[in-house]
Amino acid sequence: MTTIGIIGAGNIGSAFARILARNGIAATIANSRGPETLTSLTDELAPHIKAGTIEAAAQADIVLIAVPWSKLPSALAGLPNWNGRIVIDANNPIEAPLFKPADLNGRLSTEIVAGLVPGARVVKAFNHLLAALLTKDPHAEGGSRVLFYSGDDESAKAEVAALIEKLGFAGVDLGPISIGGRLAQFPGGPLPANNFVKFA
């Protein structure tokens, strides 16, 4: 059985945990402050979601990372090589309270994230919708809410696509990171914050 970890317990990380729990899928969630600070969330989402250390969450087969942009390097520092495990990059290069876009020196944010997770197969996903919309019923409008994803490893994308479908969303493959990462990046890309629905 595929194991799932979540690094970051802010809006997106918590939203992802809620979606998993709603579908009866187990995961380990972690933040920089330690498992004991996540009791209210894990009590809410028991028995599916448990709290752990970042090191424990990072050992899962699929790890969603959603951490404030400036804290990503410290959050991921010191972890062992990812050895081909899948990292879902749900990060955006902007953060509260100033919401000033980070200077990426012309690079895509996912390229920078990939450099922080050596050996991982990185898929960009779960970053383009607001957390409040992510946690709503994906069939609320009569179709299936669209989740975009992109990546350079086809088998990793296939696994993330299967998870997206299992959670009730309609996955749309945007191709490699060089294309999809640019389309879904916030700020700058045309797709974030748009609520697309696929009708069968």
Image (cartoon, rainbow, N blue to C red):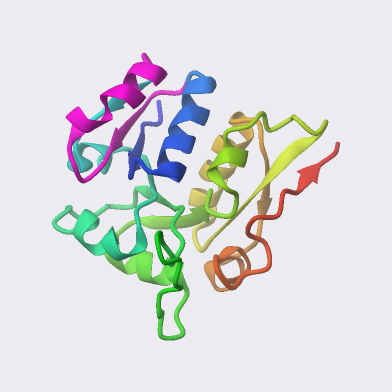
Above or below, comparing residue 47 to residue 83 in the picture: above
In depth, the one of 185 and 102 nearer the eye is 102
In depth, the one of 197 and 160 nearer the eye is 197
Q: Residue furthest left?
A: 78
| Quadrant (top left/top right/bottom left/bottom right) for the C terminus | top right
Q: How many marks?
A: 0
Q: Which residue is drawn at 72% across and 48% down?
A: 195
**Residue 22 at x, y = what percent?**
53, 21
Above or below, comparing residue 17 to residue 82 in the picture: above
What stretch of residues is rendered in magenta? Answer: 25-47
**Residue 16 at x, y = what percent?**
47, 37
Judged left or right of residue 123, residue 6 is left
Q: Residue furthest front?
A: 97
| Quadrant (top left/top right/bottom left/bottom right) for the N terminus | top left
**Residue 74 at x, y = what percent?**
19, 60
Task: Give yes or no for residue 30 being in the magenta stretch.
Answer: yes
Image quarter of residue 140: top right
Above or below, comparing residue 27 to residue 129 in the picture: above
Q: Residue furthest top?
A: 47
Image quarter of residue 13: top left
Task: Give yes or no for residue 159 being in the magenta stretch.
Answer: no
Judged left or right of residue 15, residue 73 is left
**Residue 36 at x, y = what percent?**
18, 28
Q: Is residue 118 at all visible to an observer of this figure?
A: no
